[in-house]
Amino acid sequence: MYRYILRRSVSGLLLILAVSLATFFLMFAGGDPATRMAGESGSVADIIRIREAYGFDRPIILQYLSWLGGFLTGDLGRSLYFDLPVSSILVERMFTTMRLGACAILLAVAIGVPLGVAAGCHPNTKIDRFALLFAVVGQAMPTFWFALLLVIAFSVTFPILPSSGLDSWKHYIMPMVVLSYFAAPAIMRLTRSGMIGVLDTDYIRTARAMGIVPRKVLMKYALRNALIPVVSLAAAQFGYMLAGSVVVESVFAIHGAGRLAWESILRSDLPVIQALVLCFSLFYIVLTFLADVVNAWLDPRMRIS
Amino acid sequence: MSATDTLLDVRGLRVDIPTPKGILHAVRGIDFDLKRGETLCLVGESGCGKSLTAMALMGLLPRKALRTADRLEFQGDDILSLPEKAFNRLRGNRMAMIFQEPMTSLNPALTIGQQLVDVHRQHRNVSTKEARERALFLFEKIGVSAPVERLKQYPHELSGGLRQRMMIAMALMCGPQLLLADEPTTALDVTIQAELLRVLRNLQEEFGMGMILITHDLGVVSRMADKVAVMYAGEIVERGHVHQVFNRPSHPYTRGLLECLPIPGRHKHMAHLPSIPGVVPSLIGDLAGCAFRQRCQYAEERCGEADIDWQQLPDGQGYRCILPVSSYGATSEVSR
């Protein structure tokens, strides 16, 4: 197990390095950055000054290394738009989004897994039909529309929840529900199909033939195996919630990383975009790593490969 | 025989499975009994209902399958109407079962030790340590090398033969009086088969267990069985002591099965190895008359007219046929 974690960490670090390289070259994806920063009215002298000021005239490998070094020491460059260090803008926004995403994914798992287990244990019954209806509605309904429905219901018709910002726990409820209802259907479906598959296996028949009580068969012998694909899915969805929460953050006027990314793209604020892409990728890699470790704990067969 | 000697008493056991095409009568009213320490072999082709019979005894039928019987007694207790919860206390405890597929029958996510300990602690008020000691005791009986390490291993780290030994150990954790073994050696190679059969035989003698061994391999029957029940299309067509059935088969199907056995030196070429022509009839709906008559070379018109009565011979052998092998002049000895 420890050797597996070690091996997996090394490959994770290599992946991070590759991602940082790709992110760095994003800077040059739109042509010469100095020309772009100088703008349409910039003179040749301006461009040269910018090039020297930002070090664009150095060899590219040196630029990469100094950028990477800066990233490791927490210096992410300066935002072109705010004229502030990127780190000062980013950290707060990332934490807001991560907090919201963590709450949402926990809620999604807390709803999706038990519902999926119940549906998978009793396929084609009322509970199963209800779970499938719940999933279809969740997957078919656009996020922004569901968010607006909630706002109309709980902020306008019955004003019990605030409609914007993230100042108190009450502010978290609606965005959290919207985000988790986006993630829960897939988790439910995968748990359900996993459960149906596992309950049909020979080793569950063995557990029953040995007189293990049904609840233990379910919770210890079946669920552990059925959850293996769900762990990977939940991790991927958590990652997606960070980068893809633009819609929810816009509806509820939350100053999160998703919204910052969207705005920075509109403003061509490259240092911020770069830092965000790298942070999202890092987060994704860490999540996948954690998911793999959990899976290796759940399924010993994964520890070999 | 005294009543306490009888481990299992089965009368008129039926298993019916509703399908879109009609009700499938998978087991059609079978009778047998089993005494303590005795081995009964259920023999027959695939789909004749032998596995379902075992599952019905264990109360492990698929949810939609319906089990009925005139009598189903285990150690004198009626288990037909036993509530599920009480039945669960029998399973793995007083009756246990091992399965055909050792590669998939153990939980891949739990160590062997966890699975064995769980079974023991499910039925006995013992500590984990005591349960492990019980497992190690059984490993020694079963002939498992490096027993202490085995407890820490996962199923995927073990060979097929070793996994089946673990299944046997798991089934014996609570010292059951009845062991059902559904083709326990079919998936293994021949040398391991022989070894495992020997192990089963020894354990059975040592613990005085009754055993129902399901197999299609008559070689296994001759090595293991005290009594044989030959199943065809959900019915027992012939039943008796192994030497009676092997030496003096009465039902044409039994005789056919025995003739299909390859004899070294006699069937040098595949072309000479006899087989029973035709296929098992569909079990959906009622079967009038003898189910085997379409494949039976001796069948007459009256074989299909009415249900065939069970013929019980005084020496314990019995069969379901109106034209038993002895009646058409042929020698009842299988020509060998």
Image (cartoon, grey):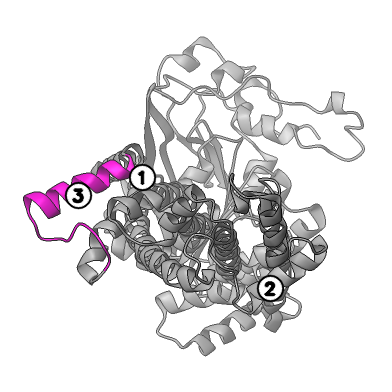
Q: Is residue B105 magenta?
A: no
Indicate the amino acid at tag 3.
Answer: Leu
In space, the residues marked 2 and 3 are separated at their CA atoms by: 65 Å
Q: What residue is at 50 percent from the left and 23 percent from the top? A: B291
Q: What residue is at 13 percent from the left and 54 percent from the top? A: A155
Residue on which disc 3 sits: A150
Indicate the amino acid at tag 2.
Answer: Ile
Question: In front here: A136 or B240?
Answer: A136
Quadrant containing the C terminus of chain B in the rendered view: top right
- Is A199 located above or below residue B135 in the figure? above
**Circle on res. A159:** none
- Looking at the rendered image, the disc whose residue lies closer to the viewer, 2 or 1, is 1
- Chain of the residue displaying label 2: B
Question: In front here: B114 or B196?
Answer: B114
Q: In the displayed orientation, state which residue is furthest to the top.
A: B301
**Circle on res. B142:** 2
Number of on-image labels: 3
Q: Does the CB distance between marks 2 and 3 fall below 8 Å?
A: no
Q: Position of residue A162 (x, y in %)?
A: 17, 61
Q: Name the secondary structure under disc 1.
A: loop
Residue on which disc 1 sits: B63
